[in-house]
Amino acid sequence: MVTDLVAHRADAPSTVTSPRPASSTAPTPSAGETGLTISQARQALREWVGKYNATLRKREWWNQNDRLDALFVEAALHEGVIERNHEIFGTKPGHKPINVTGTPTIYLPRPERQQPIGDWFIAQATYKDTKGHARPHVLAFFRSPGQSFRLAVATPIHWGERMPEPRLDADGYITDMDTTVARAVAEEYLNFWNNEKKEGASGYRLAKDSYSRKVFPKVYKGAYVAFAGHGSVFGFRTADGGSFFLFGMVNDPKHVNQVLSEALLVPQGSKTIRELGGNWFS
């Protein structure tokens, strides 16, 4: 399930729409009758990587809105816009070519659990990070009706961590995350990073050894701009009954300065947010 879907260009006014709940009286198609399949999602990932790498070979690709819009939405789109800051300050681009090794793992909801506003899936793929180390990354893709898939958020998995096993249904599709917990976790991260002094007010707390706790003191002293919100929260129920969440925290579209992408786990019955992956892009 995905909550709080946002789909807008980073240099345009922000709009937020909530997915409409499915009607309880609507007919339920079987998994094989309609909708995105796992093999199609894996192929969509490969096609996106090809377009992404081709775009990176274009001169000053970040200055062309149509090129950004063809590849990115939400937090990933903000990262594309931030490349303009890199050009202004004479720093190297933060985006690097992606060369996936091995077979990506796809996490896909049942076709009838997709939302009317579009399809989505999560992928785990291994490729080199910005420092040249091969490591697993987790990515979420979204497409509006009639459009191609675009990247919404991505982050490497921290060293020593791994993606949790999903709870799958009989056909191999992921099952819904706990949306109440998802909203609380996103709220907790916004409070923490915006230094709102409300830690734990959501009912959940960041783990003591989380990436955010380690880097916050350094980041907050720099050119930090408060986060205005977050993109879609993508996720699924884990095998132990907990929930996995993937989302990006973003600035107001008129003041794009940094993006924090997070891959998080809340085990069943726990109030502690484990940080499986995180990426600061500025």
Image: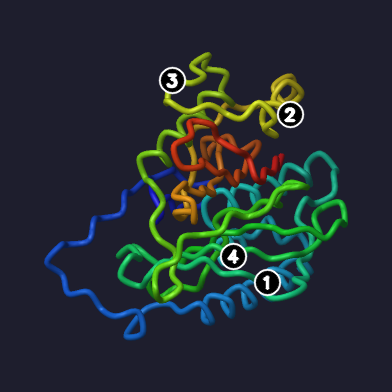
Mark earlier in primary sequence (2, 3): 3
Q: Position of residue 99 (x, y in %)?
A: 78, 70
Image quadrant where one finds the C terminus: top right
Mark earlier in primary sequence (3, 4): 4
Q: How far separated are the C-alphas under marks 2 and 1?
A: 30 Å
Label drawn at residue 49: 1
Looking at the rendered structure, the kind of residue marked 1 is: Val
Q: How far separated are the C-alphas under marks 3 and 1?
A: 40 Å
Is 152 situated above or below 45?
A: above
Q: How far separated are the C-alphas under marks 4 and 1?
A: 12 Å
Residue at figure coordinates x 69%, y 58% from the top left = 137
- Mark 4 surroundings: few (<14), some (14-19) or many (≥20) residues within 10 A: some
**Figure quadrant of residue 203:** top left
- Can you identify the residue that label 2 sits on? 215
Mark earlier in primary sequence (2, 1): 1
Label drawn at residue 116: none
Between circles 2 and 1, the one closer to the viewer is 2
Q: Position of residue 131 (x, y in %)?
A: 86, 51
Q: Position of residue 276 (x, y in %)?
A: 65, 45
- Mark 2 surroundings: few (<14), some (14-19) or many (≥20) residues within 10 A: few
Q: Are marks 3 and 4 in contact (CB under 8 Å)?
A: no
- Can you identify the residue that label 4 sits on? 123
Looking at the rendered structure, the kind of residue marked 2 is: Val
Q: Residue furthest left?
A: 25
| Mark 4: secondary structure | strand
Q: Residue furthest top?
A: 197
Q: Are marks 2 and 3 in contact (CB under 8 Å)?
A: no
